[in-house]
Amino acid sequence: MITATECLVVRLSALGDAILATGVLEHWRRVRDLRFHVLTRKALAPIFAGHPAVRAIIPVDTPDLRPLPWLRLCRDLAARHAHMPLIDLHGNLRTVALRQLWKGPTHAYAKMGLTRRLFLATRQPFFARRLRALNVPQRYSLALDATAPEAAQVRPVIFLDTDELTQGATILAERNLRRPIAIHPFATHPAKSPAATIWRALIDDLRASGHDVVIVGQAMTPLYPDQPFDLTNATDLRQTAAVLAASQCLISGDSGPMHLATAVGTPCIALFGPTTREWGFYPSGPHDIVHQSPCPDAPCSLHGQNTCTRNNACMRGISAELIRDLLRSLPRED
């Protein structure tokens, strides 16, 4: 049992996983009155800014993660934060090393790595049921909680201040966009997103029928580089969150921005193919919609990499018309 009021929490990557950690920190603040020092990558630090449960953010960069610098950092953290319990929400070799050097209590979340691999190898219903029972934030919660709370109690949350919300609305207003449909047509693993031709067909159709559209995210090649509604690479993480907060919904594949939309209360239409519910990443907002493309091989990897014997048929089966039908099923704004 934790008796301290402050803890060190570790979640080093990636974008979606870090966003999903925000809800469990808020849950522990509410039910345990805990506050946290968060160890994370520098690029992800903005996710935790303004969070009422976060007292400090300890950013690390790529050079810090190399073996010798990481070992030195672990020893320094163990000395400076010896009075704090350590909560490992990452669970890789680096964080295991940190736990080994920690002088106080340590806690780790239920990563279910073996169960995921056994399910991937065997597709046995027993493993599927275990994985479907808890999403990733609920698995995080088991680092401290004896039983996982309901998914709504650990839903991710990004805390934007008034100035940030105003900035998001201003970014859209300057482009003559009012409550647009936001679209994130990219993915770290391209197999997790429909092809660019599908996104262009959808965007052109939406705009032709009178809908405002805004494109968000980071990518090497924007879809509409000369158009004001394409904000690819134009906003930082918190600006993107503010733009999503001012949008009527987001359409995305399985991605970090998908969770960002849920975290600011914007409904999301999430398109899943090579990854499935068993991995725990379905969005959990009250109006979020998940479309899982059928495929007998899904999930075909742990993270949705481009290793598909069916030529990514699951995502190629998603059409602009199908996405429009999903969009119609969202609750209408007043």
Image (spheres, rainbow, N blue to C red):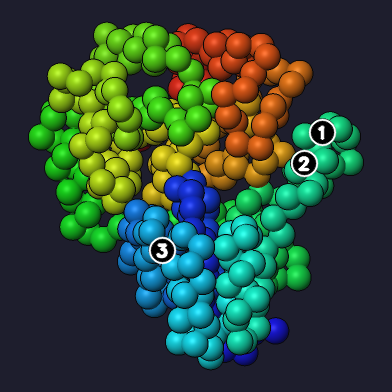
Q: Which residue is mark 3?
A: 64
Q: Residue furthest left?
A: 174
Compared with residue 238, is residue 327 higher up or lower down, i.e. above or below? above
User: Dot 2: what SS?
Assistant: helix
Which residue: 24% across, 51% down?
Answer: 165
Horizontally, residue 242 falls left or right of residue 183, namely: left
Horizontally, residue 265 falls left or right of residue 150, namely: left
Q: Amino acid at mark 3?
A: Asp
Total marks in image: 3
Which residue: 82% across, 41% down?
Answer: 118
Q: Earlier in the sequence, mark 3 or mark 2?
A: 3
Instruction: Select label 1 or label 3 by which is in front.
Output: 3
Q: Which residue is mark 1?
A: 121
Find the distance from the CA under tag 2 to the CA under tag 1. 6 Å
Which residue: 45% across, 30% down?
Answer: 187
Q: Which residue is mark 2?
A: 117
Q: Quadrant of residue 246?
A: top left
Q: Do the residues bearing badges 2 and 1 touch, measured as CB atoms within 8 Å? A: yes
Q: Earlier in the sequence, mark 1 or mark 3?
A: 3
**Few, some or many residues within 10 Å of mark 3 (<14, 14–19, 20+):** some
**Few, some or many residues within 10 Å of mark 2 (<14, 14–19, 20+):** some
The label on residue 276 is none
User: Dot 3: what SS?
Assistant: helix
